[in-house]
Amino acid sequence: MPADVDDAGGSELSFHSDTHSEGHCKESFTNGQGSTFDVVAWAPGSQEYGIYNLLICRDTVLQAEKPEELSNLKVVETRFCKFPEEPPNRRRGVGGGARAPNGHGPGEDDEDCISEGDHGEVTCPASWSGRPRSWWRVHNQLGEDLLVREGVSLRSAQIRRVAPGELVQQAGLARSLTQGGAKGCIRLPVRPSGWVTADATKAGGPKYLVRASVPRWRVVWSPPESRNGKQDAGVIVREEEDLTSGEVTVLHRGDVVEQAGPCITLPDGIVRMPVTATIIRRADQENGEGEGANGHTEKRSSASGKTAGWVTVDASMVGGPVFFKPVSEADRSEKLQQQHQQQQQQ
């Protein structure tokens, strides 16, 4: 199976212009399904009014004298008014906050446009070492799932759970509860949505989150060799989560990428993941270029943690392969495979 699957669709919209029987220009729009809108229609009996005649009526109304009942009212013709462009929404409030173009959570540059929910909890800025797009791990010794709630309030609806050891990504600035029995609890917005308790030590509870490094994934899939013995295909990095979006680059087995945000699952079960501009090629790893103390190559390309593209992690639900595994898991599997081969040779 190829690295991802493309499909396409489309719709039609047409515009027609001809001459009316009375000599006027007749214009109509057709949406491709047979319905037509006549811009010069005027049939009060069937309540059909074209835009052309409605504009004539409007012009007549504007020229009419103001009725005595409205003589003390001032009227402004908004067509001649210039209004300033609405600034980006930078306030906290009820709603979903600013959305990314793909509709999956806050946009890259709007981390502080995060909804605090409907319960009106009194909060203040919290002293928290993290920043938007930082990664955190649910404390392994917590002994219970971390609850993700709709808003900053502990009374808001629960939307999902995160198991100990799993990762969450910070979406905006932390807030501290200032009232009630949970006073002092630090609440943190996470991607793609919701709030979690990061630290409840000031309220007599545990610390729920500990800092984690950026998740790294290794390509574990390689295409079957062609007849000439070459492997030209690879895993495609696309511009958007949509499988039909433009191609950014191609990855090959052994290459490593950094995760930029939460994975999403498409309706057919395919798991897609946003990645940053940091790509560590297998060839660079083998040459030992930029290898750090942690054993990983640190060759970066001015990455800032923002999304540079999307890859398919797992297509097994549609009969395809697993393309990526976490670096630690992939390295462990490769070691076991090498040991097994050595045992067979002996």
Image (cartoon, rainbow, N blue to C red):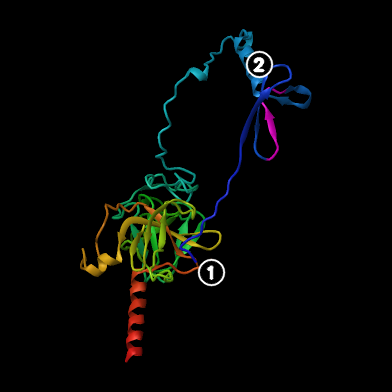
Discs 2, 1 touching: Cβ within 8 Å: no
- Determine which residue is flagged by label 1: 319
**Rendered residue at 32%/86% (across/down):** 342
What residue lies at 40% left-to-right and 58% top-to-bottom?
197
Locate residue 281: give its quadrant.
bottom left
Q: Quadrant of residue 278?
A: bottom left
Is 177 within the magenta? no
Tell me which amino acid carries mark 1: Gly
**Residue 39 visible to an observer of this rendering:** no
Which is more foreground, mark 2 or mark 1?
1
Where residue 180 appears, as percent x and y from the top left, is 42, 53
Looking at the image, which is closer to me, 254 or 168? 254
- Element assignment for label 1: loop
Tell me the distance, in whole angstroms, between the alpha carbons under discs 2 and 1.
Answer: 62 Å
Residue at which label 2 appears = 57
Q: Which residues are magenta?
A: 33-41
Taking 16 as reference, is 268 left or right?
Answer: left
Query: Label 2's element?
Result: helix
**Most common secondary structure along the magenta stretch:** loop
Q: Position of residue 145 (x, y in %)?
A: 45, 67
Is residue 240 in view from this perspective?
A: yes
Q: Disc 2 marks which amino acid?
A: Cys
What is the x, y in percent for residue 263? 44, 60
Left or right, residue 219 beside residue 23 = left
